[in-house]
Each structure stands twice: as structure tokens, then as C-alpha cells.
Amino acid sequence: MLRALVAVLAIVGVVALGVFGPRWLMSDADGQADQGVLSCDLLNDTCQWTQQGTLWEAHMEKEADNADGTVYQLSVETDENLPRLLAVLRGESMYMGEYPVPMTRTGPAEDGGSKLWEARFTAPVCTTNPEMTWRVDLQSGMEKPIDMPIKLTFQAEGRA
């Protein structure tokens, strides 16, 4: 009797995993953490925020199209004194991995007190969906990501 009960429970567990497992794996893992976080489109807006008394400003421009796709230029201005700054691309509309983009300090910003960081990159493209929404997370070098009160996103145009 005990063996039959264990067998039935094992079968029910496997069926439940088969039904609910894919939904759980495909759900937004950061969905709970992202609630209440404002989203800002880097291509259409200049994104500004204050974090622990530090001012931040980010924007992005399309530069050109080449054989690999569209080239983007990301600019981040901050009065935070950082030794390094790294932008990490993460798929927002679908997961396609994480792509680190090293940023270069190009000197003082227009206000003279802030530092300007810039990077040029081509966003990876999805072959099944030519338009992809990416999230840009900032971090200081290889340290943990900066806890930002705003979500930086942009929609990349791929090749169909």
C-alpha cells in the first residue's frame, strides 16, 4: 500500500512539474523586484535620477547601420566618482543572455562637475523577432550592479 501511494505521488509530482515548470521558468524572475520601478526609454528620453545624493543622467543615440546591425552610443553623466563603469545589456522582452559593454570616461561633462562616460556597441539581434527590448544595468567594473531606482530600456532594431 505504501509503495502504491509513493508511486502515485511521484507521478502527480512529475505531471505537476511538466505543467507548471515551463510557466515558472518563463516567468519574469525580476517581476516582483521591478514593481514600482519607473522605466525610461534611452532612445527617446534623457533619463535622469538621483541615487544616494548622486545625480545621474543617461541617453543613447543611433549612430549608423552596418553589417552587424545598428551601432548605438550610450552616454552616462554622473558626479559619482567611479573607477570604472560597465553597462550590461539584458533582454527585457525575451532573455538572450547578458552582454557587458565597457564604458570609457571621456572627461568632464558640460556642467564641469560631473564625469561623462561613453560606449559604442551593437546590440545582439534575435533571429525570430527583429525588434528586441533591452534593459541596460550599470555597475562599477565587475562589482554587483548599481541598485538603480529607474529601469533603462531601449528597443533595438534587428534584421528581418
Image: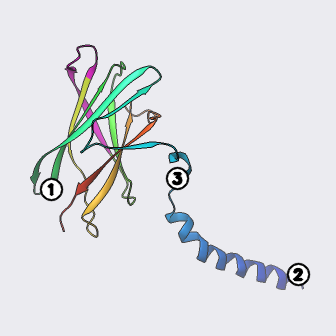
Compared with 113, 78 (above or below) is below
Q: Residue at x 23, y 14 (%)?
A: 112
Q: Are marks 2 and 1 in contact (CB under 8 Å)?
A: no
Q: Amino acid at mark 3?
A: Gly
Q: Amino acid at mark 1?
A: Asp
Q: Residue at x 32, y 55 (%)?
A: 133
Compared with 156, 120 (above or below) is above
Which of 36/26 is in front? 36
Using the numbered discs, state the Cα–Cα distance from disc 1 to disc 3 in whole angstroms: 31 Å
Boundaries of the magenta span: 100-115
Extreme-right residue of the structure: 1
Give the dominant element type of the magenta stretch: helix, strand or loop.
Answer: strand
| In the displayed structure image, the side of residue 111 where residue 56 appears, left or right | right
Q: Earlier in the sequence, mark 1 or mark 3?
A: 3
Compared with 11, 50 (above or below) is above
Residue 150's image quarter?
top left
Badge number at residue 101 = none
Badge number at residue 31 = 3
Residue 87's image quarter?
top left
> Which type of secondary structure does the marked residue at label 2 adopt?
helix
Extreme-top residue of the structure: 113
In front: label 2 or label 1: 1
Residue 75 colored in magenta in the image = no
Q: Position of residue 106 (x, y in %)?
A: 19, 24
Badge number at residue 2 = 2
Q: Position of residue 56 (x, y in %)?
A: 35, 27
Q: Position of residue 118 (x, y in %)?
A: 22, 32
Using a 10 Å C-alpha cutoff, classify the residue at mark 1 as few (fewer than 14 neighbours), some (14 to 19) or many (20 or more).
few
Using a 10 Å C-alpha cutoff, classify the residue at mark 3 as few (fewer than 14 neighbours), some (14 to 19) or many (20 or more).
few
Badge 1 is on which residue? 68
Quadrant the C terminus occupies: bottom left
